[in-house]
Amino acid sequence: MMERRWPTRDDAWQLLCEFTQSESLRKHALAVEAAMRAYARKFGEDEERWAIVGLLHDFDYEMHPDPERHPLEGARILRERGWPEDIVHAVLCHADYLDMERRTPMDRAIYAVDELASFIVAVALVRPRKSIHEVDVAAVRKKMKEKGFARAVDREIIVKGAEVLGVDLDEHIATVIEALKPVARELGIAGTDA
């Protein structure tokens, strides 16, 4: 009998879908997963494990959209279901307000890519063809200066995320843009023929 490898990306996707019905939240999870994969490759780390953290970081948000419970309740659910503690800890690390110690590169990466992935998707959606292929670092930096654009995204966390990860902000933005291109169709940013 073959031993089950735990956890798998499929396990994470099933858990995400169990708790998250919103298509936009699922797309956000896919974007963050892609960015986490890119950084795992860049740092020579376990790509699947990092991808799982990307998928799961907001899995409880629909049920617990407030800082008093998200992602603390999600962490409780993960622990009850036997998920590894390094994954649980990394999920907690994405929430700036919890003031968690980001001990590992994975902990730092989830914090760094969460807000930025959302912001880059928003930038792509306002491009003429709604395409990630029309987005570059300059376009992202320009939109970061527009307070009214994607106002829910905290620009300070984007900047702090690059610092925490130890990468230049422009390099960080470029890495996440490139990471989103292979999943552009799933994210709705592959472009139109307009």
Image (cartoon, rainbow, N blue to C red):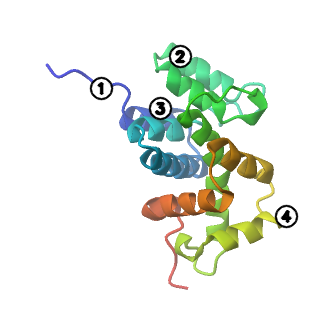
Q: Tell me if label 3 and label 4 are in contact, CB under 8 Å.
A: no
First along the sequence among labels 3 and 4: 3
- Which residue position holds label 4? 148
- Which residue position holds label 1? 5
Q: Position of residue 186 (x, y in %)?
A: 46, 59
Question: Could you give the CA–CA distance between mark 1 and mark 3, rounded to whole angstroms?
Answer: 16 Å
- Mark 4 crowdedness (10 Å alpha carbons): few <14, some 14-19, many ≥20: few
- Mark 1 crowdedness (10 Å alpha carbons): few <14, some 14-19, many ≥20: few
- Which residue position holds label 3? 15
Question: Could you give the CA–CA distance between mark 3 and mark 4, rounded to whole angstroms?
Answer: 34 Å
Which type of secondary structure does the marked residue at label 2 adopt? helix
- Which residue position holds label 2? 79
Q: Position of residue 103 (x, y in %)?
A: 60, 27
Which quadrant holds the C terminus?
bottom right
Q: Is 73 located above or below residue 8 in the figure?
A: above
Which quadrant holds the N terminus?
top left
Q: Residue at x 73, y 67 (%)?
A: 141
The mark closer to the camera, 3 or 4, is 4
- In front of the other: 65 or 113: 113
Q: Residue at x 36, y 32 (%)?
A: 8
Going by the image, does 121 lie left or right of 95? left
Residue furthest left as drawn: 1
Which type of secondary structure does the marked residue at label 1 adopt? loop
Q: Amino acid at mark 3?
A: Leu
First along the sequence among labels 1 and 3: 1
